[in-house]
Amino acid sequence: MTTSATTLALRRLRAANLRPTRQRVALARLLLESGERHVTAEQLHGEALAAGIRVSLATIYNSLHQFTDSGLLHEVVVEPGRSYFDTNTSDHHHFFCEVTGKLQDIPGEDLTVTSLPMPPPGTEISRVDVIIRVRPEGA
Amino acid sequence: MTTSATTLALRRLRAANLRPTRQRVALARLLLESGERHVTAEQLHGEALAAGIRVSLATIYNSLHQFTDSGLLHEVVVEPGRSYFDTNTSDHHHFFCEVTGKLQDIPGEDLTVTSLPMPPPGTEISRVDVIIRVRPEGA
DNA sequence: GTGATTGCAAATCTTTTGCACTAAA
DNA sequence: TTTAGTGCAAAAGATTTGCAATCAC
């Protein structure tokens, strides 16, 4: 597993034209090995340190943004002042609980926005984000 | 108009159980008199000062959140690190241009999300936010 | 009066930046 | 080499907080 995950991380970084440095490979492995997840920069930093990877928070931010720009991650904005990065890059949307702060995927086929309106003149649609905000029952 | 706008602001504040202080009335008037808009705290502060209303940024934040909690405003989260407040509290969605930072309403009837998925067990849906991200054509 | 509201300045939190140092190719 | 990437610490924003002063009722 370890070997093939490393290989996957390497392949993905190379495909994205990102030099596979020690830190980027380690972060890519953390993100790719654990299945689908939603992480904040701070969380990933904590995990990296816990896993014995010496990496600065600045590099975490750099890497998250480079990964996002390369399509390895998706950024999800649900709260002012905090960004989540989603390792699921397929077309899908999210449930977000404002009480617990928990973010959860909605499989792509479970929600469709029919008949998108025309974008403002001179612009084209780049992405559609649907956030379904939920709260604990009876709150 | 000035008189009736004041009256409207007053009525709305009273209905929301917010003591109509000088600052709150002035801010409510700024927000209600100009039609539908999307403002940031910083912007509103600037406008208030320009209009000769002495008010601190802390009070702007307090008021925006109190207005939001009372349903006088809607908060729209499109970018990490910046909150927009929307004076249109009817059911509708938004276009957001990541290049220009411009936020624009989509009339409620122009977009419908059909067949909402079941929310996670133990939760109920409180709101559905759709952000259509756009970019200048050919960018 | 009395309790809610405000102002101010400091604190907090997330994210970005500048620059010398290190490492990949 | 040589150029990209990293760490660190400082800076930059946005937002919140604590507390004394002020205002609505």
Image (tube, coloured by chain):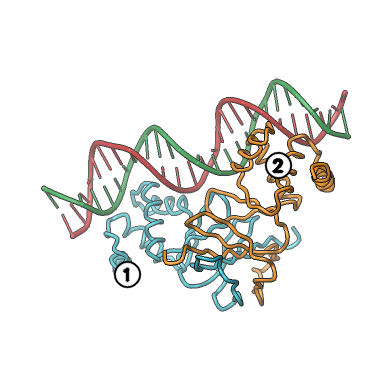
Chain colours: A orange, B cyan, C green, D red
Q: Position of residue D22 (x, y in %)?
A: 23, 45
**Which residue is tagged 1?**
B8
Above/below status of A32 relative to B4: above
Asked if residue B27 lies left or right of residue A86, the reply is left
Give the image location of residue B128, x and y in percent.
54, 68
Q: Are marks 1 and 2 on the same chain?
A: no
Q: Is residue B111 visible?
A: no
| Labels 1 and 2 touching (C-beta < 8 A) | no
Q: Nearer the viewer, mark 1 or mark 2?
A: 2
Return the x and y of residue C20 as percentages of the image width and height.
69, 21
Q: Quadrant of the N terminus of chain B?
A: bottom left
Label 2 is placed on what type of residue?
Ser
Number of other residues with Cα within 10 Å of mark 1, as a class: few under 14, some 14 to 19, many 20 or more:
some
Say left or right for B79 vs B70. Answer: right
Number of numbered labels in the structure image: 2
Residue type of the residue flagged with mark 1: Leu
Cα–Cα span, label 1 and label 2: 50 Å
* x and y, in percent, of residue A129 in the image: 63, 63
Q: What subunit carries mark 2?
A: A
Q: Which residue is mark 2?
A: A63
Give the residue drawn at x 60%, y 56%: B101
User: With respect to residue A110, does B79 lie above or below?
Assistant: above
Q: Does residue A32 appear in this view?
A: yes
Write the residue at 27% across / 59% down.
B19
Q: Secondary structure at mark 2?
A: helix
Name the element at disc 1.
helix
Indicate the chain on which mark 1 is placed.
Answer: B
Q: Residues within 10 Å of mark 2 (few under 14, many from 20)?
A: some
**Which residue: 44% across, 50% down?**
B46
